[in-house]
Amino acid sequence: MSRPLRILFLCTGNSCRSQMAEAWTRVLHPGRFEPFSAGTNPGPLGPRAVRVMAESGVDMPKQRSQYVEDLAGACGTRSGFTSKNFHSWSPSQ
């Protein structure tokens, strides 16, 4: 079996959308993708995001917000949810 494709979901706060994308990817594609999420200005994991995901049967409380710089070298594929803060970001920064 081939190695899972690593995906980095980017968002400003890494507290809601990117966290949800990471969790859904883990649930929907186990073994196929290795998802991560990070932000340019991460904050605490949003309680509403955790609650909404729990209503769908997806457990997120173990996830934590991370800085994009901490994961920049971990992934080859990136998906951003906001363009405001990522237009000048690149993996080499």
Image (cartoon, rainbow, N blue to C red):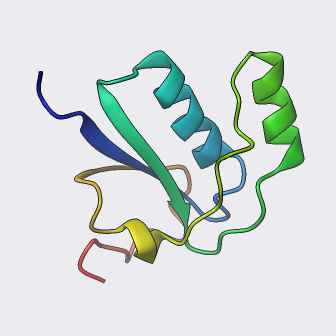
Q: Nearer the viewer, residue 64 or 79?
A: 64
Which residue does the image show at 71% across and 30% down from the upper left? 59
- Front one among 1 and 81: 1
Q: Residue furthest bottom?
A: 93
Q: How many marks?
A: 0
Up-down relation of residue 74 to residue 81 (above or below): below
Q: Quadrant of the C terminus?
A: bottom left
Q: Residue furthest left?
A: 2
Q: Residue at x 71, y 55 (%)?
A: 15
Residue 86, position in %: x, y? 45, 68
As drawn, is 32 to the left or to the right of 45? Answer: left
Residue 43 drawn at (x, y percent):
74, 68
29 is higher (above) or lower (below) than 7: above
In the displayed structure, does residue 66 sit left or right of residue 59? left
Q: Position of residue 12 (x, y in %)?
A: 62, 65
In the image, what residue occupies the spot 66% across and 69% down?
A: 42
Instruction: State the image quarter where residue 11 is shown.
Output: bottom right
Instruction: Estimate the x, y position of residue 27 in percent, counting from the top left.
Output: 52, 21
The residue lying at 64 percent from left, 37 percent from top is 20
State whether residue 64 is above or below residue 34. below
Q: Name the image quarter holding the N terminus.
A: top left
Examine the rendered structure and indicate whether residue 16 appears above or below residue 5: below
